[in-house]
Image (spheres, helix red, strand yellow):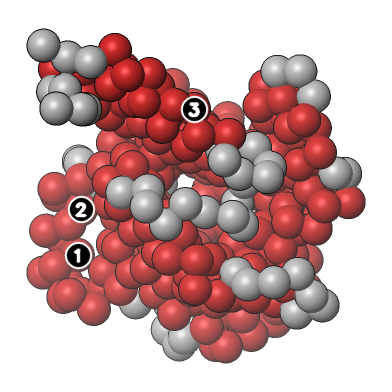
């Protein structure tokens, strides 16, 4: 038989594990990580975040792509009307399945590598912290873009109404451009997204400290009370980053879609494309699509990071609960004292 002390001992162990720290664990905390969290939890949470971010913002992304790829200046309403007239309502979501499939491994890689980078380089609180956090975001972005860029190229061409489907687009690119065609825009994608995600992470970190978001965790229902502030801080970071990196995003779109004509960057790399746009459209051409990009970046950052932190926290809590429920009966069944 089992000794009654066995059950009490198991509960005491669980209690100590929950209260043995000086401060309560913040499941939304971005800088302080539990290194024992399995990689699959980061990967699963990151994949959910990626799908939520890209699919929810896809219609706006379609409008932005049409605005940036057009050889002449068009407004967001004109781009929307153009898509609806030529492709119908389904055209607003054309290519969503492609980016949905790509963002699962890409975001798993992003958040997994981000966690490793923060654990290694996050470090103490000092004047260099914003740069270190931005660097962590940049490392994660390099992994993310290396996976997602081919999907993004196919997605944008489908958004513009080209090809009968994703397979037709991929095969056509392979025949005409080879493997290089899928990664031609990777340098400009990194030049756009590394500073973008670096700014998002650094702004979010600074805002959370300025607004004392972590202190809200000590209030009743602290996790729920602090969650909206996490979404807000990430959203503001996304808006700032989206606006500042719009010129590189315009160049990336032009290189990926290769619109014919002198304004379409039919030849040349990043500098050649930027010079072509500035020469034919002026500096305003480099900020085409600014409004939809900011409208996309703001909720995207909030949804992506908010979903990631929420799902990661839920998986961690479920895993802990399951382990405890499984562990206590084992202790009860085996006498502690003989």
User: To which residue does mark 1 refer?
Assistant: 173
State the SS at label 3: helix
- In the displayed orientation, state which residue is furthest to the front: 338
Q: Residue at x 59, y 62 (%)?
A: 197
Q: Residue at x 26, y 69 (%)?
A: 182
Which quadrant holds the N terminus? top left
The number of discs equals 3
Q: Is residue 6 left or right of residue 275?
A: left
Q: Position of residue 223 (x, y in %)?
A: 66, 27
Marks 2 and 3, the one that precedes in the sequence = 3
Q: Position of residue 45 (x, y in %)?
A: 39, 39
Distance between the alpha carbons at the discs numbered 2 and 3: 57 Å
Seen in the picture, residue 75 relative to 271 is either above or below; the reply is above
Q: Is residue 335 left or right of residue 23?
A: left
Q: Position of residue 76 (x, y in %)?
A: 67, 39
User: Mark 2 and 1 residues: CB-CB less than 8 Å, in contact?
Assistant: yes
State the SS at label 1: helix
- Res. 248 visible in picture: no
Q: Is residue 63 left or right of residue 168?
A: right
Residue count near mark 2 (Cα–Cα under 10 Å), binned few <14, some 14–19, many ≥20: some
- In the displayed orientation, state which residue is furthest to the right: 210
User: To which residue does mark 2 refer?
Assistant: 169
| Mark in the foreground, 1 or 3 | 3
Seen in the picture, residue 283 relative to 311 is either above or below; the reply is below
| Mark in the foreground, 2 or 3 | 3
Marks 1 and 3, the one that precedes in the sequence = 3
């Amino acid at each position: 038989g089992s000794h009654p002390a066995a059950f009490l001992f198991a509960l005491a162990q669980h209690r100590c594990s929950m209260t043995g720290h000086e401060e309560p664990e913040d499941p939304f905390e971005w800088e302080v990580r539990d290194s024992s969290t399995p990689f699959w939890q980061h990967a699963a949470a990151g994949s959910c975040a990626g799908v939520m971010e890209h699919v929810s913002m896809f219609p706006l992304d379609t409008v932005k792509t049409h605005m940036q790829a057009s050889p002449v200046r068009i407004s967001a309403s004109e781009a929307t009307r153009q898509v609806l007239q030529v492709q119908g309502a389904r055209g607003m979501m054309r290519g969503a399945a492609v980016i949905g499939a790509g963002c699962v491994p890409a975001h798993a890689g992003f958040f997994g590598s981000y966690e490793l980078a923060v654990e290694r380089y996050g470090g103490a609180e000092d004047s260099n912290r914003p740069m270190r956090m931005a660097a962590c975001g940049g490392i994660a972005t390099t992994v993310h873009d290396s996976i997602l860029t081919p999907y993004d190229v196919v997605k944008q061409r489908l958004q513009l109404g080209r090809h009968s489907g994703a397979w037709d687009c991929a095969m056509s690119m392979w025949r005409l451009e080879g493997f290089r065609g899928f990664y031609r825009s990777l340098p400009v994608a990194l030049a756009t997204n590394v500073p973008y995600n670096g700014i998002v992470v650094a702004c979010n970190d600074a805002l959370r400290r300025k607004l004392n978001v972590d202190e809200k965790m000590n209030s009743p229902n602290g996790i729920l009370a602090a969650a909206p502030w996490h979404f807000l801080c990430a959203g503001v970071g996304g808006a700032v980053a989206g606006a500042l990196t719009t010129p590189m995003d315009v160049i990336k779109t032009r290189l990926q879609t290769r619109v014919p004509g002198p304004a379409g960057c039919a030849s040349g790399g990043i500098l050649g494309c930027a010079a072509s746009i500035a020469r034919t459209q002026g500096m305003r051409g480099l900020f085409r699509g600014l409004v939809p990009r900011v409208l996309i970046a703001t909720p995207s950052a909030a949804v992506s990071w908010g979903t990631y932190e929420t799902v990661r926290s839920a998986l961690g809590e479920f895993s802990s609960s399951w382990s405890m429920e499984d562990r206590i009966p084992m202790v009860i069944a085996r006498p502690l004292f003989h």
